[in-house]
Image (tube, rainbow, N blue to C red):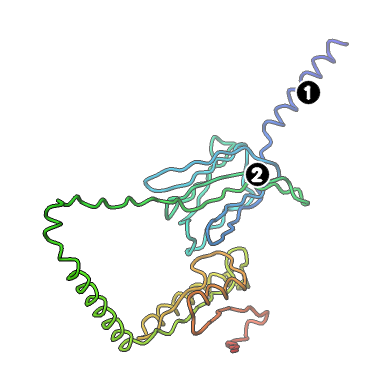
Amino acid sequence: MNKYWKIFIFAGLQFAASLACGQQIDIRSMHYVSAADKSQIVFDAAEIPAYKVFQLANPARLVIDISNARLSQSIPQPPVSHPYFVAVRSASRNKDDIRVVVELKKQVKARSYNTMPNKKGVNNLIVELAETGTQVAKAQTPAVDKTIKASASPAPKAAKQLASAEAKSKAKVHRHASERKPKAVVVAIDAGHGGKDQGAKGYSGALEKNVVFAIANKLKALVDKQPGMQAVLVRKGDYFVDLRNRMKIARAAKADLFISIHADAFPEPTVKGASVFTV
């Protein structure tokens, strides 16, 4: 009897081990978080996953391999205006793993980390991206023969007179140019929301932050076509800017006019029109 118990216990342990090894981590969702200087891909997981992140070239791609995991939902595509991403796709790998491939618009540097579970028991795998800094080599000044240079240079007194005459001539030209061309009217165009702040959501799933950003770009093109006018976008991509920093950006551009664009939602579909507020 003791012999059979040993066999039964051993078989039970083998079965439990196979269950533990075969149980995949549930990746519940994936979303994007963007700021002015960096972007994040955030995976919400039931447990802390094992993973590997690396990059490929020609074309530029970011690859995220998550071991022993499965996706509960389809991966959302990044907005067209995203500063780094073109498109994202996913597929199963080795039957048990997930591979997520991100097509990139430019070279980036990536770092990744896990977070501790929050109050709801959700673990986050975060892949953070920032632009790579590229150094431009300075042009070398060609060597000049000292004898030729000395013979070509004017006398000290004549050189001072020549420099003074050139300075006066440049100042006169600059003064006349400023008199002919008045300062352009600068228009700051503020596309509402952005990044984590999605704004209202339309019936078909359109997000306010994307709609107003498209309107802002079209308005900028129209303003820039007008003689004596120049448009400046307060946000140039899908990232969050708080209200105070929106003001700072407009003031730094010396804006004469500030236009904030929003696309409000309303529960009644028959309601149409626009609201305009001026200060």
Q: For residue 9, which quarter of the picture?
A: top right
Question: Does the CB distance between marks 2 and 1 fall below 8 Å?
Answer: no
Left-right relation of 94 to 267: left
Q: Residue at horizontal 51%, vertical 63%?
A: 79
Per the rendering, the mark at residue 114 is 2
The correct choice, above or below, for 30 with respect to 222 in the image is above
Is the residue marked by circle 1 packed among few (<14), some (14-19), or many (20+) residues within 10 Å?
few
Q: Farthest residue toward the front? A: 157
The correct choice, above or below, for 103 with respect to 257 in the image is above
Is the residue marked by circle 2 packed among few (<14), some (14-19), or many (20+) residues within 10 Å?
some
Report the amino acid beneath label 2: Asn
| Nearer to us in this view, 266 or 228 | 228
Give the position of the N terminus as an image quadrant.
top right
> Of label 2 and label 1, which has the lower sequence position?
1
Left-right relation of 186 to 50: left
Could you tell me residue 34's position as x and y percent?
56, 59
What is the tally of numbered marks visible in this picture? Answer: 2
Disc 2 to disc 1, C-alpha distance: 33 Å
Could you tell me residue 180's position as x and y percent?
30, 88
